[in-house]
């Protein structure tokens, strides 16, 4: 369907969203600046400025406030482009960088060619709220890891050493090995670690319940050994809509699991992965890849392929194999989500034998 002339916004707005104030710049159809200023970064402030006006193209940069700001502007009837901040070198590299200059630059780039902004699409409010449950659990896990490392380091400084154990069992296992000089200082830390472990288990139960009751499609993803409710639910909520990718192979680059390229002439340096997209989901997929390749992973095509890759990879073969398995796992999960098929762990092996 082609847009009619009245559907095409005649004004382009660059909105540099700040924590307290957001600067805006209005450009007319000919690229002439017609208005600039700032508003408070609140629903009332932005709504008062952009409600009850003709439809405009509003360009803003992805950030903490961009999800609710973009939804508010769309509810006001405007077309919204959320720019990928990793692609805005023309703004960050400006020697005269100010909030008002950034707003004008966003407007001019959006007016020139929106593809230069590599626009992203924010998830819906419900998915964002549900994903907050997983992010809260992740924050507790990170805090527990820091506290465990603190306890181990403190004990080593006194010539002691704590036994190896899983993180959930650390508070119980370590209590009897704390040097007498540190009992009063590390005792409360161990109690905090124990409480965090209890809270994390509670979050795990809530995540499992949410996956089963509200996102039954996660069941197709959990068929893969090494992918539990946490990873499956995070995958579904992060991507939100499986049809947004025409091919499953596009999920790998979207999650930053493909290599960066910086080719020039005959030079083709080997660079690391781009690390674009959601960092938490990428970390969970890498964790699943470690499990698949580890001693407890079940036999499957993905494990066999990863082990072959690690065997011929040289010094860093294992690390590269883990990333490669994580990337292929993301493709597999999206394919299972779209098709709803029953997962066959050794499908490729069976086909090879038949051939």
Image (cartoon, rainbow, N blue to C red):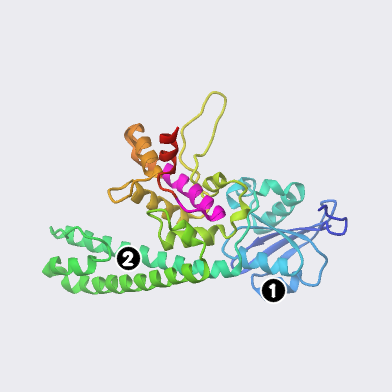
Q: Name the residue carrying label 2.
A: 144
**Residue depth check, mark 2 versus mark 1: number of the one nearer the observer:** 2
Q: Are marks 2 and 1 in contact (CB under 8 Å)?
A: no
- Residue 35 or 329: which is nearer the viewer? 329
- Residue 66 or 317: which is nearer the viewer? 317
Classify the position of the C terminus by image quarter. Answer: top left
Residue at 40% across / 35% down in the picture? 353
Residue at 42% across / 40% down in the picture? 350
Q: Where is residue 48 in the image (x, y as percent from the top left)?
A: 74, 74
Left or right: where does residue 41 sit relative to residue 277? right
Q: Residues within 10 Å of mark 1 (few under 14, many from 20)?
A: some
Secondary element under disc 2, as helix, strand or loop, is: helix
**Chain-order first, disc 2 or disc 1:** 1
- Residue 151 or 20: which is nearer the viewer? 151
Q: Which mark is residue 18?
A: none
Residue at 52% across / 26% down in the picture? 267
Residue at 14% across / 60% down in the picture? 158
Q: Is residue 324 above or below residue 73?
A: above
331 drawn magenta: yes
Q: Where is residue 164 in the image (x, y as percent from the top left)?
A: 19, 57
Q: Is residue 245 above or below residue 200?
A: above
Q: Is residue 206 above or below residue 275?
A: below
Q: In this view, does 329 lie above or below 200?
A: above
- Residue 96 or 52: which is nearer the viewer? 52
Q: Name the residue carrying label 1.
A: 45
Please state the extent of the stretch shown in magenta in the rendering: 324-343
Secondary element under disc 1, as helix, strand or loop, is: helix
Q: Position of residue 181 (x, y in %)?
A: 13, 69
Outermost bottom residue: 44
Left or right: where does residue 116 sit relative to residue 267? right
Q: Distance between the residues labelled 2 and 1?
A: 39 Å
Main SS category, magenta section = helix
């Amino acid at each position: 369907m082609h847009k009619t002339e009245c559907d095409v916004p005649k004004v382009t707005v660059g909105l540099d969203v700040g924590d307290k104030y957001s600067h805006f710049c209005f450009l007319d159809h000919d690229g002439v600046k017609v208005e600039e200023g700032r508003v408070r970064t609140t629903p009332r402030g932005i709504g008062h400025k952009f409600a009850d006006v003709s439809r405009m193209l509003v360009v803003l940069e992805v950030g903490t406030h961009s999800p609710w700001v973009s939804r508010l502007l769309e509810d006001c009837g405007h077309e919204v482009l959320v720019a990928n901040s990793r692609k805005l070198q023309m703004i960050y590299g400006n020697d005269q960088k100010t909030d008002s200059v950034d707003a004008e630059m966003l407007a001019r780039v959006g007016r020139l060619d929106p593809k230069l902004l590599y626009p992203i699409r924010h998830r819906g409010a419900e998915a964002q709220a549900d994903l907050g449950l997983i992010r809260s659990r992740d924050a507790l896990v990170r805090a527990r890891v820091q506290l465990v490392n603190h306890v181990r380091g403190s004990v080593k400084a006194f010539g002691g050493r704590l036994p190896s154990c899983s993180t959930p069992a650390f508070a119980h296992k370590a209590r009897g090995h704390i040097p007498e000089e540190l009992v009063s200082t590390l005792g409360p830390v161990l109690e905090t670690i124990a409480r965090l472990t209890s809270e994390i288990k509670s979050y795990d139960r809530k995540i499992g319940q949410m996956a089963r009751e509200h996102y039954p499609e996660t069941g197709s993803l959990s068929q893969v050994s090494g992918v539990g409710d946490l990873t499956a639910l995070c995958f579904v909520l992060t991507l939100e809509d499986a049809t947004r990718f025409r091919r499953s192979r596009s999920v790998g680059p979207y999650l930053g699991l493909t290599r960066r390229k910086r080719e020039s002439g005959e030079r083709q340096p080997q660079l690391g992965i781009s690390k674009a997209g959601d960092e938490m989901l990428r970390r969970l997929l890498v964790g699943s890849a470690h499990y698949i390749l580890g001693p407890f992973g079940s036999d499957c095509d993905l494990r066999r392929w990863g082990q072959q890759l690690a065997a011929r990879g040289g010094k860093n073969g294992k690390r590269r194999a883990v990333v490669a398995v994580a990337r292929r796992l993301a493709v597999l999960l999206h394919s299972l989500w779209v098709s709803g098929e029953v997962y066959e762990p050794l499908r490729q092996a069976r086909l090879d034998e038949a051939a």
